[in-house]
Amino acid sequence: MSTGVIIALIVVGVVVVVAAGVFAARTKPRGGRSLKSRFGPEYERVVARHDGDTKAAEHELTERVRRHGSLRTHDLEPAARERYRARWAAAQERFVESPAEAVAEADALIADLAKERGFPDGTRYEDQFEALSVHHGHHVHGFRRVHEAAHTGIGAGTEELREAMVEARALFDDLTGTGGHVARRDRTDDAVTDGAHTRHNRTNSPLKGRLAKGS
C-alpha cells in the first residue's frame, strides 16, 4: 500500500471520528439547563414524578434524548394536512354532544398524525410519547391528557375534557405546521368552548369560564 493511500485513509478516519463527535454533541443533552430548555414543562413533570429527585429525572430525560434525539421527521403532504385539519374540526364539533368521544378521537388523531410525521407507531404509546417529548416537549402534555382521558375517563368532567382538548391543540398545530393559523384555530376551539357551555345550560353544571385564546 502506497504512502499516499495510507495518508488518505488516515484523513478519512479522522473526518469520520470528528463527524461522529459533532453528531454526539448535538444529540447529547448538556446538563440540567439544556434539558429544561429542550423539554420545557415536561422537565418539571418528570421531576415531580420522581418526587423531586432531579438526578433521576434528568437521567430519564437523557435516555429519551439518546433513544429519540436523532429521529428525523418528514413534512406532511398538503392533502394530508387538510385531512387532519378536517378530522380535528369534526372532533371539536362532536364535543358539543359527546365530549368523551371527541377526546378519544383527538387522542387517535394525534397518534396517527405523529406516526405519519415519522414518530413511533401509536400502538406503542409510551414510545411515541417519549419521542414526541424530545422534539415537542413544550406542548406534549396535551397529548398525555387526552390519552389518559380517552383510556380511563375516571372522574373526568366536561371542563376537564375541554381543557384536555384545548391543550392538545398546541401539539396538533406543531405537528401539522399550522401554528400561524390563529383565526382558524380560534374558530374551531370555540366549538369546544361553546359545546361546554351548551352542555352547561342543559345540565346546569358549573364551568370555569370561557376558553382563553392562544396567540
Image (cartoon, rainbow, N blue to C red):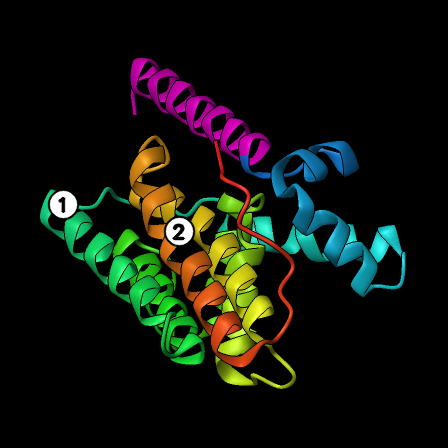
Q: Is residue 60 left or right of residue 24?
A: right
**At 34% across and 62% down in the image, what residue appears?**
92
**At 41% across and 65% down in the image, what residue appears?**
195
Taking the view exactly as shown, the residue that stands out farthest to the left is: 79
Closer to the camera, 166 or 62? Answer: 166
- Magenta-highlighted residues: 1-26
Say whether residue 96 is magenta. no
**At 50% across and 68% down in the image, what residue appears?**
146
Quarter that holds the N terminus: top left
SS at badge 1 = loop
**Coordinates of residue 6 in the picture (x, y in percent):** 37, 21
- The mark found on residue 77 in the picture is 1
Q: Amino acid at mark 1?
A: Glu
**Coordinates of residue 168 in the picture (x, y in percent):** 47, 56
Q: Amino acid at mark 2?
A: Asp
Q: Is residue 55 above or below residue 34?
A: below
Say whether residue 10 is magenta. yes
Q: Residue at label 2? A: 189
**At 46% across and 27% down in the image, what residue appears?**
19
